[in-house]
Image (cartoon, rainbow, N blue to C red):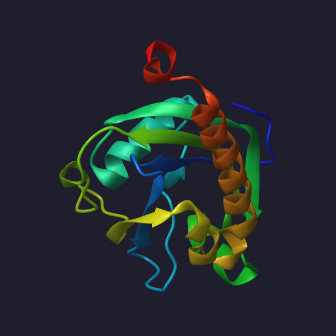
């Protein structure tokens, strides 16, 4: 766990890509709006960040049928708007510090559900990478832009790697 101010909640974020490089996003149950977000959640005491990401994936979308592609090299943080600070986490945190992971979903859409034991989303969909930042609440936009930029680099590097087809054929 990195050093961080106690005023930022330690959290993980998950960018889950399908085979078309679209991103899983959900609409939050507790904040009905036009905004969507990627799965994310707090790191429990003594939990490693990657383990937290896998746990959050299972808890929020009902599946961990995914392969880790990359880990963002930095911890990213955002501040909550003052109007939300008192309500969220009993006012203890001014925002979140997040470690982001990019996963490739290996299954079928039928494996995914937001109707989990403790649901956080009312609905979900796959969203093109280019549309992501415009669908998030504004106070998270800078973090999402950083994750999108990193994902584009990861996907570009993967596209340049030779596949077995190219090597053999």
Q: Residue 11's x, y, as percent? A: 60, 47
Image side of residue 117 versus residue 137, left or right: left
User: Residue shown at 48%/86% (left/top)?
Assistant: 33
Q: Residue 89's x, y, as percent? A: 58, 64
Q: Is residue 53 visible?
A: yes
Q: Quadrant location of the C terminus?
A: top left
- Number of on-image labels: 0
Question: Outermost residue toward the top?
Answer: 168
User: Residue shown at 56%/76% (left/top)?
Assistant: 135
Question: Outermost residue toward the front?
Answer: 169
Q: Residue 26's x, y, as percent? A: 41, 67
Q: Residue 39's x, y, as percent? A: 47, 55
In the image, residue 1 sits, relative to residue 30, either above or below, namely: above
Q: In terms of image quadrants, where is residue 96?
A: bottom right
User: Residue shown at 23%/55% (left/top)?
Assistant: 117
Q: In terms of image quadrants, where is residue 130?
A: bottom right
Image side of residue 14 versus residue 29, left or right: right
Q: Is residue 80 visible?
A: no
Q: Nearer the viewer, residue 69 or 79?
A: 69
In the image, residue 66 sits, relative to residue 62, either above or below, namely: above
Q: Nearer the viewer, residue 118 or 24?
A: 24
Image side of residue 116 versus residue 42, left or right: left
User: Residue shown at 31%/63% (left/top)?
Assistant: 119
């Amino acid at each position: 766990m990195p050093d961080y101010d106690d005023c930022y909640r330690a959290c993980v974020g998950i960018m889950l890509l399908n085979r078309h490089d679209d991103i899983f996003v959900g609409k939050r149950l507790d904040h009905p709006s036009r905004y969507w977000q990627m799965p994310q959640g707090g790191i429990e005491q003594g939990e490693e960040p990657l383990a937290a990401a896998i746990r959050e994936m299972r808890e929020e979308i009902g599946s961990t049928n995914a392969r880790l592609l990359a880990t963002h090299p930095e911890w990213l943080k955002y501040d909550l708007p003052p109007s939300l600070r008192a309500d969220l986490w009993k006012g203890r945190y001014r925002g979140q510090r997040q470690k982001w992971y990019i996963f490739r979903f290996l299954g079928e859409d039928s494996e995914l559900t937001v109707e989990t034991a403790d649901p956080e989303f009312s609905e979900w969909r796959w969203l093109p990478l280019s549309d992501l930042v415009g669908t998030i609440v504004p106070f998270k936009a800078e973090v999402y832009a950083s994750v999108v930029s990193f994902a584009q680099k990861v996907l570009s590097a993967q596209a340049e790697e030779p596949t077995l087809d190219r090597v053999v054929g």
